Amino acid sequence: MQTVHSAPDHIMHGCEDERARTISKPRFLEQLESYLKKEIQSIDITKPNAQELKLQAYREVFEYFIEDFKTYKPLLSAIKNEYEITLACHREQIRALEPLKTMLVTVSEQCEQKILALRDAERSEINTLKQEKVKLLKCIDKIKEEQIHLQSQVKKLQDELAAEYLRYRNEYDARKVLVSDINELRYQHEEMKQFRLPGDTGEDPVKLKVALKMAREDLAKVQIELNQMKADYGDVVPRRNFEALEKNYNNLIEQHETIQKDYSHVRQEYDTLLEVHKQVQAQRDKFHAELEQLKRSSTPRPDWSRCADVITGGAERWASLAGGLSSNELVDVLLREIADKGVKEEEYINGLGIGNDIPLYLRYDGQIKHMKLSQKDLFNIVKDIWKEKTPTDQQASKHSSMPEFFQSYLQTKYGSLAIDWAYNIYESCQRHESDEFINLFFSILTGKMDESVYHAQISLMSHLFNELTSSDTANNGILSNKEFRDTLKKAFPLKNDSQIQELIKTAESQLGTPQEGINYKTLFAENKEGRAGAFITLLREQQTIEKQDYLNEVRRELGNVRELKVGDLREAFHSTDPSMDKQTLESYLCYAFQTPKESLEHASPRDINTVFQRLLAMDVKRQGPSQMEN
């Protein structure tokens, strides 16, 4: 609630002024309106908190109004308080919705990137198909040209064959005529022999000479024609040979098609067998992991009742501490009791001094009384610190470091005893570093870890719970095993099947007795000590392992280098995770090189071990699937 200021000197009670009775408005009302108008005119509406300043001016005027009317003061104060409470509730709801808004923007950007990637892939495939189409069209044109050329050759040969056939037909007819003439001459010669005179030799030399000359001319002509026929048709394949070759070619085509079909069938069987092999291999790995887990869990159960002899309070106190806890939780309880027992004899804590190397909240010279905080008390204090810090940073519109807020928190809550509580909280955190929640807070307080790691864990739990709630259409807090598995895959698309299966088994183990469906709200519930269950613990462990694997992959991309440059680390992130947006990458680089964004490109090289230690200390996560998965 805002502090009520006393009215300014120029504001006077209207009921005491006699002249106020002669005007339409009371003077006190006019003074309040004038004061409100001046305050509103003095506000810069361009500032982000202009509306808050206007509301503050109206709040002050309302306070003056309440103070003036004593009779109505209780009722008006109650009305004002209810409005203040309602405004505070609305502010809390707005702050709670801010992470969802950021998450929505991130998911929208990722979807747009995936759509652009799909479009690029389709564009590349379309270009390839177009090129292939052009190539095939060229092949078709070439084949058509060859076909036209062959048809013209066939037509030419057909014409030549027809002409040759006609010429041979004429020669054949001429030969028949010649043979007929020869036979006629032979008959005439025989007739002449019968009438030959004595002393006649029987042959006419002139006739024989003429016949010999004509025979030689015919022989020369036939020889010329024979040579011409050999030259023209020496390379022509006989039709019977052509038909035999064509038949052999058709048989080879049929055999090739049969072999191609057999190959496709064998290929399909091979792909099926390969898929079956992968499934069998996955089942083998799954059964092997279950076997290893059974081997680890099959060790003899310890007799926890024996711890009652060494615990302060005996069996009755041990029974109250160990009731309904698992073996792992009983070990934590036993370690806390041993740690608390070790400090009971210490009465004071020595101050570290007032040097500049000492944190501001620990600068004290002297002895401080030991409060002997238990782990449960420390756990509640740390939870309260986180509960106060987040809304404080949001209200101030800037992020404060944990040491600064820690000192402010102690001074506000404990006043003059702030230094005592600082030393006791610091000493208790050192004692209970085995607790994951306390260790994370202590690492952030001492600067070993960035605060983004804590907020990343909270965002992870919120994201998963919202996804499970969206899948719960019946709104009864229970999902079937298939719905639970599908929701986990949707919420964590980068997790592999073994990680999803491990989460499901841990959830079933945490819920205990077999039941139909999974009560997901129980998985997020805290135990009686305020700690998360096994399912949430495993989810955080997977997040840490995924970050380590991701950074190891980035480091392998860099190779064997000692001095790391900003450009080299940027290229390594791009090669390992191409889906990472520029803003996230710039934040990683600025934190790794401890350099503002403006001077990032001019940053000097750093030792690679130092750079990756800083990256391990902040919230670093993969934005898209790895190259191995692709």
Image (tube, grey):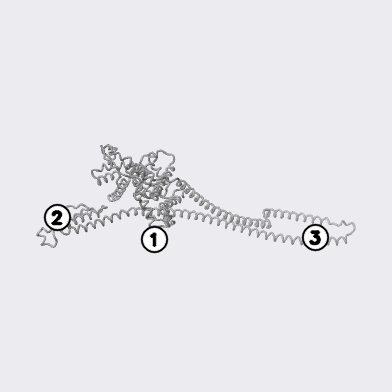
Real-space Cα separation, disc 2 to disc 1, in angstroms = 61 Å
Q: Which residue is mark 2?
A: 11
Outermost residue toward the right in this view = 198
User: Which of the pair 612/142 is nearer the observer?
Assistant: 612
Residue type at mark 1: give it. Answer: Ala
Q: Position of residue 402 (x, y in %)?
A: 30, 45
User: Which of the pair 16/590 is nearer the observer?
Assistant: 16
Q: Does the image show residue 38?
A: yes
Real-space Cα separation, disc 1 to disc 3, in angstroms = 119 Å
Q: Is residue 407 above or below residue 154?
A: above
Residue 182: mark: 3
Task: Give the SS element for disc 3.
Answer: helix
Label 3 Cα crowd, 10 Å radius (few <14 / some 14-19 / many 20+): few
Label 2 Cα crowd, 10 Å radius (few <14 / some 14-19 / many 20+): some
Tag in front: 2 or 3 = 2
Q: Which residue is mark 1?
A: 474
Real-space Cα separation, disc 2 to disc 3, in angstroms = 160 Å
Task: Give the SS element for disc 2.
Answer: loop
- The reply to whether discs 1 and 3 touch (Cβ–Cβ < 8 Å) is no
Residue type at mark 3: give it. Answer: Ile
User: Which of the pair 578/513 is nearer the observer?
Assistant: 513
Tag in front: 1 or 3 = 1
- Decide which of tag 1 and tag 3 comes sooner along the chain: 3
The answer to which image quadrant residue 190 occupies is bottom right
Residue type at mark 2: give it. Answer: Ile
